[in-house]
Image (cartoon, rainbow, N blue to C red):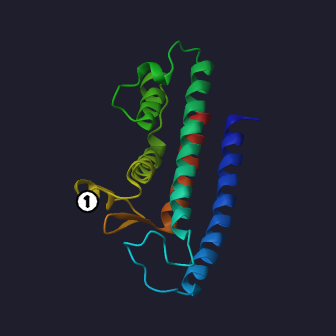
Amino acid sequence: MKLTAQIDYDCKCLHRYFEKLFHVLQEAIEETRNAPISGAQDMDADELQVDHHGFAHYIKPDMVTNMYSLVDFWMNGICEYQKSKKNLSRGYKDIKKSRESELHAYQRYLIDYVGLDLTSVESSYKRLDDLRNVRNKIIHNGSHVPSSEEEKLLTINGIRLAGSLIIIEDSFIWDTLDHAKAYLYAAAKA
């Protein structure tokens, strides 16, 4: 199977998975909305005093991490494919700078070392960098944004804050998945 066909297949699978997760999300929200309240929660109590434990707030962050994992997996694969195709001696890890993100290293490798022209998907790369930033806040900060970084995160289309907590809109998921597919496809077929 061609690399572009594999990427297309994985993106379609992730799309179908997200559709199912959005259905589960709606059910979880409704279930939480209809859950009986068993009394006030005493924050000093040893045990939680609520009968219902919702999980809706985990679904979209899970989508973000799954999407970034897909991008990271395929970017590594595309770099290896291009290295082999062009018979290059160095891989992206060989040119990666110490404080550089993996995503930026992949991009720089493909453009500067492999010689790909990815200007047609520059907006998709920027969206993937937004995905990386959101994913990092989810993984490393428990979905919270330090006050010094709030302004930057609020510039990301489809991301809001509730206090310091990231709120991911549905549009962020779908738009970013489309950009991921476009970027990966362009890098693989070049």
Residue most extreme to the left: 148
Q: In this picture, is 62 found above or below 185?
A: below
In x, y percent, where is residue 1? 77, 35
**Corner quadrant of residue 52:** bottom right
- The amino acid type found where label 1 is placed reads Glu
Helix, strand or loop at mark 1: helix
Front position in the image: 126 or 139: 139
The answer to whether 161 appears left or right of 92 in the picture is left
Q: Quick one: quadrant of the C terminus? A: top right
Residue most extreme to the top: 89
Front position in the image: 175 or 53: 53
* Residue topped by disc 1: 151
In x, y percent, where is residue 88? 54, 15
Q: In this picture, is 165 found above or below 105?
A: below
**Corner quadrant of residue 162:** bottom left
Q: In this picture, is 163 found above or below 125?
A: below
Front position in the image: 167 or 104: 167
Q: Residue at x 62, y 19 (%)?
A: 84
In x, y percent, where is residue 26? 61, 76
Q: Residue at x 46, y 48 (%)?
A: 128
